[in-house]
Amino acid sequence: MGSDEVDPLSFQITVVPLNQLSDEIKKLLQGRPGGLLKVQGRIYVIRDQRCLILPDRPEADMVISTFLKSESVFPPARSRDEILRNLLETPMDQISEEELAASGLRHFHHPIVLLFRSDSRMDSSFGHLFEAYVPLDEEDILVPMNECSIVVIKKNPLLSPDDAEEFAQAAIETLEVDGGLTVCCGIGECKSDSLELGRSYQEALAALRTADLYHLSGSVFKFRDLVLERILLSIPREKAQAILKEILNGAFSMLASQEMMETIKVYFDQDLNLSTAARQLYIHRNTLLYRLEKIRKATGLDLRRFKDAVVLKILLSLPSSPEEGNRKERL
């Protein structure tokens, strides 16, 4: 390469199949001499059913000239799924305008990411099964992430996390009943524009990981609902151990028993209601009272009082707690 040439790889360049360009760009490219279009600060160049997209800069002519002479310096065209996966997994400040243009999501406002995962054994990919069983809106985008997980990107300025949860619940029910699959879903926050898709994806991923770690019941987990768990996970393990030793020092073995952990979990899930918790545990109400009294004597915390119940809930959610050991055994 001569001193007066520009290294094409120093440019933010995207090469995509021609059929993956937006209809608007395809229309503008029709009849253009040499298949070259300059619009919205970008240059589109067509050759052999592929389109080179690069920023409209003074040095671009040299890059285009190199491209027309030899394509060996350019990466092969990527599928739209590959481009979308990269958009989801790349930090926002590292996404190029060309990458965003190639994704077709430039004007995809108010997106929200739903990450579906299935641990079931499947003869086909999860993405194919999802498309076969779950009806999607016209503007929804499905992105296969791997053989057992897919992302659904929904676009709707009026879509709330609750609406997204309803869609996820309906999809999971359909996949379980009609497809025989076990599926869970993490939901990120709705973002202002497509540049923040990666953040919504990371939130959905964090929701699933947190649900796994805490063995949360249910199949749909919203990032915004896991505030307590995320706060507690940020506490250094050494600090958590010191707190636990101070408060639960003599009660670890008793609290760590499967019977006691199940009792506490069901009691909390039933909002501290003695009668409904006893029914769920298939025990007499007096048996439940006996177990709660046993906890009070060992820890000084009376779980019939909301404040004490909150304290124990937090303690059992800390790293190094008795519940963490149970979580690890169940995962």
Image (cartoon, grey):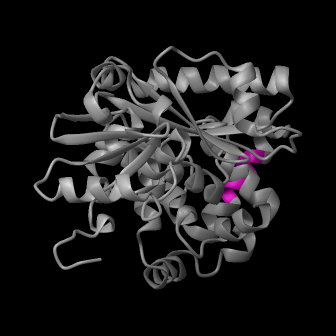
> Where does the magenta region start and end?
288-293
Residue 202 vs residue 300, the one in the foreground? 202
Q: Nearer the viewer, residue 213 or 188?
A: 188
Q: Report which quarter residue 122 is drawn in.
A: top right
Q: Position of residue 249 (x, y in %)?
A: 59, 81
Q: Position of residue 261 (x, y in %)?
A: 72, 58
- Residue 87 visible in the snapshot: yes
Total marks drawn?
0
Quadrant containing the N terminus in the rendered view: bottom left
Q: Nearer the viewer, residue 79 or 245?
A: 79
Q: Position of residue 142 (x, y in %)?
A: 56, 31
Instruction: Look at the magenta stretch and give its main secondary structure.
Output: helix
Tell me if residue 261 comes above or below residue 182 in the rendering: below
Instruction: Kindly tell me whether residue 226 is visible in this rendering.
Output: no
Q: In the rendered image, which quarter contains the C terminus?
A: bottom right
Whole-percent x and y of residue 243? 46, 78
Residue at 76% in and 30% down? 129
**Residue nearer the viewer, 31 or 302:** 31
Q: Is residue 144 left or right of residue 24?
A: right
Task: Tell me what residue is drawn at x 28 percent, y 70 percent.
Answer: 7
Inspect the magenta stretch and tell me whether residue 14 lies in it: no
Question: Quick check: 329 left or right of 317?
Answer: right
Q: In the picture shown, does residue 183 fall above or below 147?
A: above
Residue 289 is inside the magenta segment? yes
Q: Residue at x 49, y 23 (%)?
A: 140
